[in-house]
C-alpha cells in the first residue's frame, strides 16, 4: 500500500516533536508533504523554529516547514510555557536550525496542496490549535471536499479540561477554528485527552527511549524528563502523556486505537465552557455523527511501535 500523503500542522511542544519524529521515521506509511507551524504552546516564531529543530534532529532537513497564523481566528493567543518551558522544547540542548522556513504562508500551502492533489488523497494532521486549518477552509471553501481525512489531537469528554475545567488546550486556544473544522463535513478522527492520558511515558518506557542510544532517543527521553513534571504534579500520573504521537501512530497502526463514531460539537460562545468538545458519547441526541472519538489504546503496543520507529532515525 502506498504511503499516506499528510500535512502535519503543529505547535511544538515536546509531544508534537515526538509525533513529527515518528512520522519522519515511517516513510513506508507516511509521506510528509509539509509541516505547517501555528501559534499555540509557544508563539509562532518558536513553533516554527522548533519544527525545524526537530526535522534536523531526525536527519531530514529537506522537509518543508511553513509558518502559519500567529494568533487565533477571533481571540487573543493563549500559550503554555508552564507546560513546555520558555522555548517550547525545553529538556534537551539542541542546535538552532540551519534549514530555513518556506516563503509561502502555511495557509496558502495547505490550500494549494489540496487543490494540486486528487480529492481524497491528502490527510491533515493538526497537533495544535486549529487556526491554520480553519483559516484555510474559510479562505478557500472549495478545498474542504478535497481533504481525505483530518486526524487531530484535541478535546476531551471523560477527562474534561486541562487548560480550563471544561476545555482541552488545542480546542480552547481557537474554538472558532475548531467549530469550522468540526462542522466542515470532512471525516475526522479525534485523539482527545481520554486516550492520550493513557499514553503515559512511565519510567521504564522512558528508559527504553534513552536506551536506544542515539541522539534522537536521548533527546526524546530528555524532552519527557522535562515535559512530565506538569502532568505528574497535576494528575499524580506515572509519567507524561504523549498526546500528539497518538495521531501519527494511528496512521501507522490504527488497530492500536478504539473509539466511537459520534457527534462532537464545539462550545464557541459561553466563556464558562469555551472550547469544550461536547461529545455525544452516549448518543443521547439525534445529532449526526461527525467524528471517530477515540477513547482507548493498546499502550504497550503504542510504545513498542514508537520505540522501534525512533530507533530508525
Ligand atoms: O492538550 C494537549 C495539546 O496541547 C497537545 O497537542 C500539546 O502539544 C498542546 O498543543
Ligand atoms: Ca501540540
Image (tube, grey):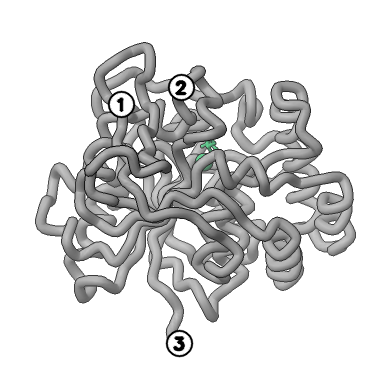
Residue at point 65%, 46% (across, down): 242
Q: Quadrant of residue 112?
A: bottom left
Q: Which residue is mark 2?
A: 166
* Place of residue 272 in the rendered image (x, y in percent of width and height, measured from the top left): 37, 12
Asked whether disc 2 touches disc 3, contact meaning CB atoms under 8 Å apart, the reply is: no
User: In this view of the protein, can residue 129 be seen by the observer?
Assistant: yes
Residue at point 67%, 46% (across, down): 198
* Place of residue 271 in the rendered image (x, y in percent of width and height, measured from the top left): 33, 13
In the displayed structure image, the side of residue 55 where residue 147 appears, left or right:
left
Asked whether disc 1 touches disc 2, contact meaning CB atoms under 8 Å apart, the reply is: yes
Residue at point 41%, 42% (across, down): 282
User: In this view of the protein, can residue 313 be seen by the observer?
Assistant: no
Disc 3 residue crowd, few under 14, some 14–19, many 20+, Cα 10 Å: few
* Place of residue 294 in the rendered image (x, y in percent of width and height, measured from the top left): 49, 51
User: Element under label 2?
Assistant: loop
User: Element under label 1?
Assistant: loop
Q: Quadrant of residue 240?
A: top right
* Place of residue 256 in the rendered image (x, y in percent of width and height, measured from the top left): 60, 64
Amino acid at each position: 500500500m502506498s504511503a499516506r500523503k499528510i500535512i502535519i500542522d503543529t505547535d511544538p511542544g515536546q509531544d508534537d516533536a515526538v509525533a513529527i519524529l515518528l512520522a519522519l521515521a515511517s516513510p513506508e506509511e507516511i509521506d510528509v508533504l509539509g509541516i505547517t507551524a501555528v501559534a499555540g504552546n509557544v508563539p509562532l516564531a518558536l513553533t516554527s523554529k522548533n519544527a525545524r529543530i526537530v526535522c534536523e534532529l531526525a536527519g531530514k532537513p529537506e522537509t518543508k516547514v511553513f509558518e502559519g497564523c500567529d494568533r487565533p481566528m477571533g481571540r487573543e493567543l493563549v500559550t503554555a510555557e508552564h507546560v513546555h518551558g520558555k522555548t517550547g522544547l525545553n529538556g534537551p540542548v539542541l542546535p538552532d536550525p540551519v534549514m530555513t522556513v518556506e516563503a509561502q504562508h502555511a495557509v496558502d500551502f495547505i490550500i494549494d496542496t489540496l487543490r494540486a492533489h486528487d480529492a481524497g488523497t491528502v490527510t491533515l494532521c493538526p497537533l495544535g490549535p486549529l487556526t491554520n486549518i480553519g483559516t484555510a477552509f474559510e479562505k478557500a471553501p472549495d478545498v474542504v471536499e478535497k481533504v481525505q481525512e483530518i486526524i487531530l489531537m484535541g478535546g476531551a469528554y471523560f477527562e474534561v479540561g486541562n487548560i480550563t475545567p471544561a476545555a482541552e488546550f488545542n480546542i480552547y486556544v481557537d474554538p472558532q477554528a475548531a467549530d469550522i473544522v468540526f462542522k466542515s463535513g470532512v471525516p475526522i478522527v479525534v485523539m482527545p485527552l481520554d486516550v492520550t492520558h493513557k499514553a503515559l511515558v512511565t519510567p521504564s518506557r522512558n528508559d527504553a527511549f534513552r536506551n536506544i542510544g542515539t541522539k534522537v532517543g536521548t533527546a526524546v527521553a530528555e524532552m519527557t524528563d522535562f515535559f512530565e513534571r506538569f502532568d505528574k504534579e497535576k494528575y499524580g500520573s506515572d509519567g507524561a502523556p504523549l498526546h500528539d504521537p497518538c495521531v501519527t501512530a494511528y496512521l501507522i497502526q490504527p488497530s492500536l486505537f478504539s473509539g466511537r463514531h459520534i457527534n462532537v460539537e464545539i462550545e464557541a460562545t459561553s466563556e464558562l465552557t469555551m472550547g469544550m468538545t461536547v461529545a455525544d458519547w452516549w448518543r443521547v441526541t439525534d445529532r449526526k455523527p461527525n467524528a471517530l472519538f477515540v477513547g482507548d489504546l493498546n499502550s504497550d503496543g503504542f510504545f513498542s511501535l514508537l520505540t522501534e520507529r525512533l530507533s530508525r532515525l
